[in-house]
Image: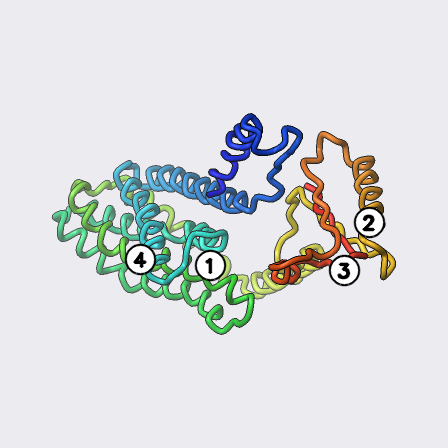
């Protein structure tokens, strides 16, 4: 719809001027377009999905030394998002800034379960087990721990159910989107991932050099842990000291319900002397517009929309609810 309106401004309005349906000097300008927020949210989600996919492929391929396992993990991202979108339809939600934000919030979690499952399957295949047996044993080993971790993550969104008013109206769709997407990732990790690995991955051979490396890493970790246990007081006091030092950063952290953003738009509300006539208020608004143009360079101003007084006539009642104006002596300007 928004694209059609923009197309009409660029195509249909000139045609109407040529046909004489509207005056040649008339100018029709798009004052406000809230679809930009949706477009930015979609772009941000695409960027996060793309970045997450690249990092998954690189990290999994690096540690498992194989590309196919990373491909198995990668396909969980779009499938989880698709199931989340299906959940929107079933729950009566639609695609908006909050639901897209919920999906973006879940992108970082959807690959966790699948990475654990794939890594464990590769480990069992490395033991020389038959493929089906390795996939079954590996999936059964991690099913319960992954379920516990998933439920722990989903529990974060439970308090939203106890919110009320406008806050619940805003954040409930976000929570629904995140919960559906994360829950879908667990189901996919327990079903699609094992089936994919059973069809694609090959039975590996036990690599003694990797065992030696693993034993060496375990030995170093054991030595560090033994050393820390021998200096318990120092470790505890050091941890408490780091915690206290971190509290010094609290005054430097902002506290906002929503973060500050530079939207490139500001609103100026004007109240003149009570009882001022509409035409006198208009003259004062023109002066304010000229003052704004003196401060802000002309090439940086897209539009200045002035709304003076209250609308009159039949059907004006509802529009007055949305206006901050109280009468002919008040006005507001929106500068883009």
Does residue 242 appear in this view? no
What residue sits 47% from the left and 64% below the top?
172
Looking at the image, residue 191 sits to the left or right of residue 180; the answer is: left
Residue 77 visible? The answer is yes
Q: Nearer the viewer, mark 4 or mark 1?
A: 1
Q: What residue is shown at x 65% (from left), y 33% (from top)? A: 26
Q: Nearer the viewer, mark 4 or mark 3?
A: 3
Sequence order check: which comes first, mark 4 or mark 3? 4
Which label number is shown at residue 327? Answer: 3
Tag 4 or tag 2, which sits nearer the N-term? 4
Q: Are marks 2 and 4 in contact (CB under 8 Å)?
A: no
CA distance separating discs 1 and 3: 39 Å
Callout 2: helix, strand or loop? helix
Precedes in sequence: disc 2 or disc 1:
1
| Residue that lies at the very extreme toward the front in this rendered image | 20
Rounded to the nearest angstrom, the CA distance separating label 2 from label 3 is 12 Å
Give the labeled residue for mark 4: 186
Residue 193 placement, left or right of 298: left
Task: Name the residue that disc number 1 marks.
Answer: 174
Residue 153 in the image, given as x and y percentages of width and height: 42, 62
Coordinates of residue 217 in the picture (x, y in percent): 38, 47
Crowd class of label 1 (few under 14; some 14 to 19; many from 20; radius 10 Å): many
Mark drawn on residue 279: 2
**Circle nearer the N terminus (4, 1):** 1
In percent of the image, x 17 and y 40: which residue is there? 202
- Residue 278 on image: x %, y %: 80, 53
């Amino acid at each position: 719809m928004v694209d059609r309106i923009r197309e009409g401004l660029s195509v249909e309005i000139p045609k109407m001027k040529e046909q004489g349906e509207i005056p040649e000097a008339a100018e029709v300008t798009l004052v406000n377009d809230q679809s930009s927020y949706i477009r930015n949210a979609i772009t941000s989600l695409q960027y996060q999905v793309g970045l997450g996919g690249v990092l998954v492929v690189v990290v999994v391929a690096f540690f498992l030394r194989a590309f196919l396992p990373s491909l198995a993990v990668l396909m969980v991202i779009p499938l989880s998002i698709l199931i989340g979108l299906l959940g929107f339809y079933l729950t009566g939600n639609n695609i908006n800034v909050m639901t897209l934000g919920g999906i973006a919030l879940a992108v970082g979690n959807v690959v966790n379960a699948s990475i654990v499952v794939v890594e464990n399957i590769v480990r069992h295949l490395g033991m020389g087990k038959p493929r089906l047996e390795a996939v079954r044993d590996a999936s059964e080993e991690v099913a319960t721990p992954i379920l516990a971790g998933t439920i722990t993550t989903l529990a974060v969104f439970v308090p939203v159910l106890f919110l009320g008013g406008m806050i619940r109206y805003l954040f409930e769709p976000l929570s629904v989107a995140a919960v559906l997407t994360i829950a879908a990732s667990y189901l996919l990790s327990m079903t699609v991932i094992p089936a994919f690995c059973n069809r694609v991955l090959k039975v590996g051979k036990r690599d003694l050099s990797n065992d030696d490396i693993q034993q060496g890493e375990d030995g170093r970790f054991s030595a560090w842990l033994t050393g820390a246990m021998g200096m318990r007081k120092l470790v505890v006091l050091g941890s408490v000291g780091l915690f206290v030092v971190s509290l010094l950063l609290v005054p430097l952290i902002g506290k906002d319900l929503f973060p500050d953003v530079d939207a490139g738009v500001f609103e100026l509300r004007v109240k003149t002397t009570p009882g001022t006539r509409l035409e006198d208020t208009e003259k004062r608004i023109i002066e304010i517009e000229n003052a704004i143009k003196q401060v802000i360079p002309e090439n940086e101003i897209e539009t200045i929309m002035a709304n003076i007084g209250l609308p009159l006539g039949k059907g004006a009642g509802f529009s007055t609810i949305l206006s901050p104006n109280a009468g002919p002596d008040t006005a507001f300007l929106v500068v883009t």
